[in-house]
Image (cartoon, rainbow, N blue to C red):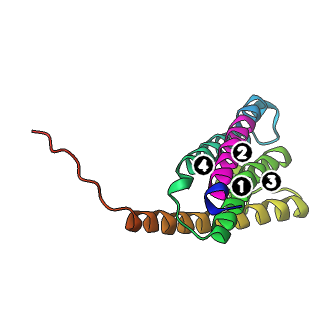
Amino acid sequence: MNKQTLTNRLAEKLIFFGVLLFFLGLIVGLFIPVMANPRMGLSSHLEGIMNGIFLIVLGLIWHRVKLPARWLKITYALAIYGTFANWAGILIAAVLDAGAPLTVAAQGNQGTPLAEAIIGFALITLTIAMLTISVTVLVGLRRNMKREPLRPTLASG
């Protein structure tokens, strides 16, 4: 698979998974009142919507991210993991009424050690993933800016 085909395919997948995550965020919103911690449920609802939009936007600008094929794949995988782990980790905290050590929305409620370990793992690893994505996308966009010459614009007046 050539790099252009890879770029296009990953962009399509980012947009698809973005719409899926947006939809899942909406579905979570329907169940907020019955969750053990509704405030965490609201957080999961919003994380699904915001991270879904992030993936859609990332897919739309993906062709401007100039990275080696390997880094495109790594960045793509981290984007999918980070966004879905963000939504799911907070959803688990909402359902199990947990997450106090890592999030204010838990309102001091702490779950079982296993629940806290799962949530902690998700939140810590997604943070690393999202920071890595931000850096690699910025590098790729900067490389694109250096490659493309500035096009003159018509001066109004």
Where is 7 relative to 22, above or below?
Answer: below
User: Magenta residues, as a range?
Assistant: 6-24
Q: Residues within 10 Å of mark 1 (few under 14, many from 20)?
A: many
Q: Which mark is residue 17?
A: 2
| Mark 2 to mark 3 CA distance (whole Å) | 27 Å
Q: Residue at x 75, y 34 (%)?
A: 32
Measured as percent of width and height from the top left, residue 18 is found at 67, 43
Secondary element at tag 1: helix
How far is the residue under mark 4 from the one under mark 1?
11 Å
Q: Secondary structure at mark 3?
A: loop
Nearer-the-camera pick, 2 or 24: 2
Q: Nearer the viewer, mark 4 or mark 1?
A: 4
Secondary element at image label 4: helix
* Residue in the picture at 68% in, 51% down: 9
Magenta-drawn stretch contains 4: no
Where on the picture, by quarter, is residue 85? bottom right
Q: CA distance from mark 4 to mark 2?
A: 10 Å
Q: Is residue 87 above or below residue 133?
A: above
